[in-house]
Amino acid sequence: MFAASESDVKAVAPTHVENILPEEYKSSQNQFHQYDTWQDDVKVVRDFPEQSREVLSKLTPEQVARFHEDGYLVIPNFATRDQLLALARAAEAEVSGFNTDEYKSVFSTSPDKQHGKSDDYFLDSGDCTRCFYEEGVFDEAGNLKVPKLKSINKIGHAMHAIHPVFRAYSNSLPHHQVVKSLGYKRPLIAQSMYIFKQPFVGGKVGCHQDNTFLYTVPTSCIGLWIALDDATQTNGCLWVIPGSHKGGTKTRYRLKTEEVTAENGEKRTVRKLYFDPPITPGMFREEGGIPVEVKAGSLVLLHGDVVHYSYANTSPNQRHAYTIHVVEGDAGWAKDNWMQKGCFLPLDGSETQVSE
Ligand SMILES: O=C(O)CCC(=O)C(=O)O
Ligand SMILES: [Fe+2]
């Protein structure tokens, strides 16, 4: 554990997209995010099943107790098939419209270059939507070995704010009620990811805690992970270590800037990410982990300190999931979180009234 001082944090401040009005995103210049293109699917994703609106979205005292005991909770049948299909359509269009040349300009097969440059690509993805490739999908010459649609590991990290379909789904009353029943006062969606876990090439996600990456004081991150496909041990379902959240946040992923001098004497500032304290072999263990096999449409709630992971998908079946990470708006957002510029969208359900 580490001590977080006041100087480590700042109040979560509204960022430039936080208060974006529906009218503004309706007139988005990005053809892939235009409201008009998506208005039918916006209606579809607003249409939660009856039980999510009334029963499941207000967690029972037993569910709340179980979440606090285990650090996670599964809510089956949270979303309908139609909602999931609409989310998948939006994700597919996003990948289809993804400009691979833009990415290739930051991609290099040289390990040194690749690391440094892709850090920028990642670091600047907090307020936009960017596609990240699975590992091993490029050949030596930098050409894709699998079709583009089967090559993307995830899209991140602000679909919840700038894509009409993801926004309508994310900022919904059922999500609001779930986090409210866990005691959140002013929940903000800090980031979103669409995770593909592609057939054959879907990569492993190592043991981690979400508070490591989205750190607030006091810690407050909660993950809302929705399965778009049946998630099984074969296609790389989530694994969690029940109760592991009780040990607190083990490490933080921090950002620092360093001045480096190039060979020609030119000075420039580079951004570096590091774990504090450094990850040691014993820090995260898979020991005690259990598979969270769920049906498509199940919502999995993940406490920010619960250790979770997923294995590579070596099967022919995809395992898509959409996940939003929510923080308490009244907590302090760590100044040196990787996400310097994000879209903190209030999760108040106001965006998407549940249809009658
Ligand atoms: O979907 C996965 O495999 C990992 C997701 C995850 O770590 C998260 O949503 O916090
Ligand atoms: Fe996670």
Image (spheres, rainbow, N blue to C red):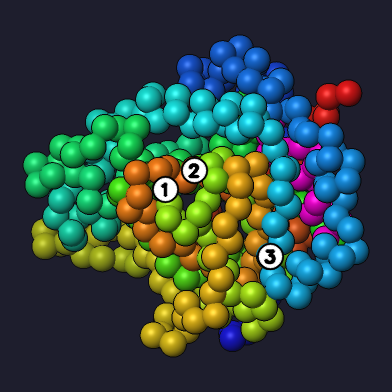
Residue type at the position of mark 2: His
- The crowd level at tag 2 (other Cα within 10 Å; few <14, some 14-19, many 20+) is many
Residue 16, how many percent across, how many down? 62, 38
Please name the residue that numbered disc 3 is placed on: 72
Disc 1 Cβ-to-ligand 1 distance below 8 Å: yes
Of the two numbered discs 3 and 1 on the same chain, state the one appearing first in sequence: 3
Please name the residue that numbered disc 1 is placed on: 197
Disc 2 Cβ-to-ligand 1 distance below 8 Å: no
Residue 350, how many percent across, how many down? 82, 33
Residue type at the position of mark 1: Lys
Is 191 placed above or below 143 here?
Answer: below
The span from disc 3 to disc 2 (Cα, nearest Å) is: 19 Å
Q: Secondary structure at mark 3?
A: strand
Whether 219 is among the magenta residues is no
Q: Residue at x 72, y 43 (%)?
A: 77
Q: Is residue 173 visible?
A: yes
Residue 319, how many percent across, how many down? 47, 46
Residue 183, how many percent across, how many down? 85, 61
Q: Quadrant of residue 111?
A: bottom left
- The crowd level at tag 1 (other Cα within 10 Å; few <14, some 14-19, many 20+) is many
User: Residue 188 has which mark?
Assistant: none
Q: Are marks 3 and 1 in contact (CB under 8 Å)?
A: no
Q: Are marks 1 and 2 in contact (CB under 8 Å)?
A: yes
Residue furthest to the top in view is 36
- The crowd level at tag 3 (other Cα within 10 Å; few <14, some 14-19, many 20+) is many
Q: Of residues 319 and 158, which is closer to you in this image?
A: 319
Of the two numbered discs 1 and 2 on the same chain, state the one appearing first in sequence: 1
Please name the residue that numbered disc 2 is placed on: 320
Q: Residue at x 11, y 59 (%)?
A: 264
> Which quadrant is the C terminus positioned in?
top right
- In the image, the segment drawn in magenta is 168-182
Is 258 placed above or below 47 here?
Answer: below
